[in-house]
Image: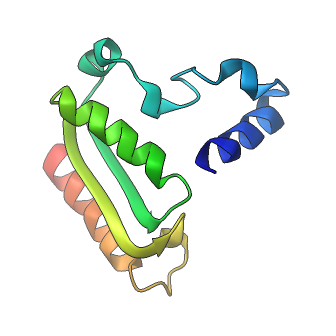
Amino acid sequence: MGRQVWFDIYEELAGQNAISRINDPWLFPNLISDETCQKAPPAVILTSEYDILRKSAEQATGVYRKNKNLLLYGNFRGAHHSFQYDFKHERTDAWFNTIKTVKDKYL
């Protein structure tokens, strides 16, 4: 399901057929090669338990971890995609505290 969301977004924004770019790591960052990952800045990857893009985030985490280029992986339990914009969601504070921790520690 996650890939279909990106196809739809890409086609709306670019006016191109996304299927022709199914293996494009610029469109699907979880497909990053080891070589590119090793040259990339270290990554912070955050997702949530019910995120439609969680599988992609987990795949990207695996690549960054394998290449020793992962600063932090976080999976917010009980939350959905973009939950942080719902200020009444019980996990929103955890999201913003994590962002603050990342900023304070790494930036």
Residue drawn at point x = 52 percent, y = 52 percent: 53
Vertical placement of 62 versus 31: above or below? below
Vertical placement of 24 versus 96: above or below? above
Image quarter hosting the C terminus: top left
Residue drawn at point x = 35 percent, y = 69 percent: 76
Does the rendering let one see residue 107?
no
Residue 81, quarter of the rendered image:
bottom right
Does the rendering let one see residue 18?
yes
In the displayed structure image, the side of residue 48 where residue 34 appears, left or right: left
Q: Nearer the viewer, residue 19 or 91?
A: 19
Residue 7 position in % (x across, y down): 72, 37
In the displayed structure image, the side of residue 60 where residue 104 appears, left or right: left
Q: Nearer the viewer, residue 96 or 20?
A: 20
**Colour setup of the view:** rainbow
Residue 82 position in % (x across, y down): 54, 64
Residue furthest out toward the right: 15
Residue 1 position in % (x across, y down): 64, 51
